[in-house]
Image (tube, helix red, strand yellow):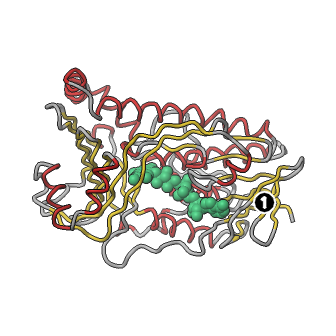
Amino acid sequence: MTLDVMIVGGGMVGLSLACALGNSPLQVGLVESSSQTKTPPVAGFDVRVSALTLASEAMLKNIGAWEHIAHERLGVFREMQVWDAGSSGSVHFDGAQLGQPHLGYIAENCMLQVALERRIAALSNVHWYRPAAVEEITVKQAHAELRLDSTRLRARLVVAADGARSRVREGLGIPVHGKDYQQHAVVAVVQSERPHAETAWQKFLATGPLAVLPLPGNFSAIVWSTTPELAVELKELDEVQFCQHLDEALESRFGGFSLVGARGVFPLRRQHAQHYTEPRVALIGDAAHTVHPLAGQGANLGFLDAIALAEVLRDALVRKRDPGSLAVLRRYERWRKGHNHLVQRSMDGFHWLFVGGGKGRQLVRGLGLSMTDRVPLVKQEIMRFAAGMQGDLPLLTRPDAKLWATR
Ligand SMILES: Cc1cc2nc3c(=O)[nH]c(=O)nc-3n(C[C@H](O)[C@H](O)[C@H](O)COP(=O)(O)OP(=O)(O)OC[C@H]3O[C@@H](n4cnc5c(N)ncnc54)[C@H](O)[C@@H]3O)c2cc1C
């Protein structure tokens, strides 16, 4: 049997594409190597979280996943507070200045995946292949063939959503260029003495940005990007010492912390595939690009890829065109690659400005932050960027939009 679309990778991005193609005339396969998605812990929160933009919130609603989200596990942020350790500069953003009740949400990745999978369970045109790892891809004229452990699968279009070390991308020899930020992110969940005030906090230390992202109650997710050496130290400190270091780094603004669960460490790298499409193949999400997490954009960009590709496939279907043809897929690449590149470059710019540097750079960032705080137009543009409201946005980021006649 030849399916229309085979998605390789059931992470947040691949699952979103499957939902966006749900109830379409396309027959969709979803190949995932892990046997089961991690379920969120009963007590506390999982350490892997993502900041969701307003655009991602709208998308999750439109593809039918939002109603499956465990809302009691979702942290909301209405404001953002950014400041710099090496200068007196700071800037405060408030959703109200954009006419929005909030600027975004903080969600555990595994909780989002469970919600997306619940939605998929109701879609009769999406078929799981799990656990099944793709080992090889061969592109033929009318289809692409995937070799799994013991079977072969065929589809008119294969979508690689298999993460930063994409087997599909590597199998096709699509080059990536990138940069090692020479930083690792230490992630943790903590409980603070004082409330986080539904605010996303970010302090730029000389060694990298430290983010405190609000979860329900007094819980927060910590993303502490720093040198690889300091990351190892922070990971190995005992719980009390880690919390003391965190408290000192944040000038005791939260009145002290206690650690909830284990810490994790992730090396940070910018990576971009030289191209996103080939005949019968498209790359989305981390398989196509990775960015520094300092503005919490990685998964959000992946969601935009997924729904832009779904829209391109819908238009191809209306015009009775082959969904795997390069002519169709190029539109997706033109739509998304430039935008992702721009966001990567902006992150590099922030990283350069805020991490390290001498007195001159310190002065520039202090002035930059303070001026941003005082110029409402600039502030609004930054907030629109952070909320995912800029650029040529796919239809599914608009309220109550749908791609197919039935949802
Ligand atoms: C510290 C840190 C903080 C971050 N914070 C944010 C944030 O606040 N906001 C945000 O938007 N982004 C954030 N990101 C980025 C975000 O986590 C990623 O962009 C996102 O998880 C990528 O999702 P994905 O589905 O593309 O890839 P992945 O999550 O990597 O999923 C890939 C899937 O493919 C499967 N797979 C792999 N190989 C195969 C194979 N051969 N066959 C079958 N299946 C396969 C894997 O099992 C996996 O399920 C952060 C990243 C880091 C490191």
Q: What residue is drawn where x is 34% and y is 69%?
A: 45
The relative height of residue 81 versus residue 132 in the rendered view (above or below) is above
- In the rendered structure, the answer to whether residue 370 lies left or right of residue 306 reads left
Q: Which residue is mark 1?
A: 146
Quadrant containing the N terminus is bottom right
Label 1 CB sits under 8 Å from any ligand 1 atom: no
Q: Would residue 62 be seen by someone viewing this image from the given angle? A: no
Where in the figure is residue 136, as x and y percent of width and height?
76, 58
- Label 1: state its secondary structure: strand
The image shows residue 96 at horizontal and vertical percentages of 28, 42
Count all numbered tags in the image, as a single digit.
1
In the picture as drawn, the residue positioned furthest to the front comes out as 229
Q: Camera-side residue: 385 or 47?
A: 47
In the image: residue 228, left or right of residue 331: left
- Answer with left or right where residue 118 lies relative to residue 258: right
Provide residue 117's location: percent of width, then percent of height: 57, 69
Q: Which residue occupies 23% across, 25% down? A: 358
Q: What residue sits 33% from the left and 32% below the top?
A: 380
Residue lying furthest bottom = 42
Q: Decide: is 173 above or below 43.
A: above
Q: Eyeballing the image, is 199 above or below 295?
A: below
Res. 186 image quadrant: bottom left
In-image side of 319 versus 384 (left or right)? right
* Residue 176, picture quadrant: top right
Would residue 327 be seen by someone viewing this image from the given angle? Answer: yes
- Between 171 and 341, the one lying in front of the other is 171
- Quarter holding the C terminus is bottom right
Residue 338 image offset from top left, x and y in percent: 57, 31
Report the amino acid beneath label 1.
Leu
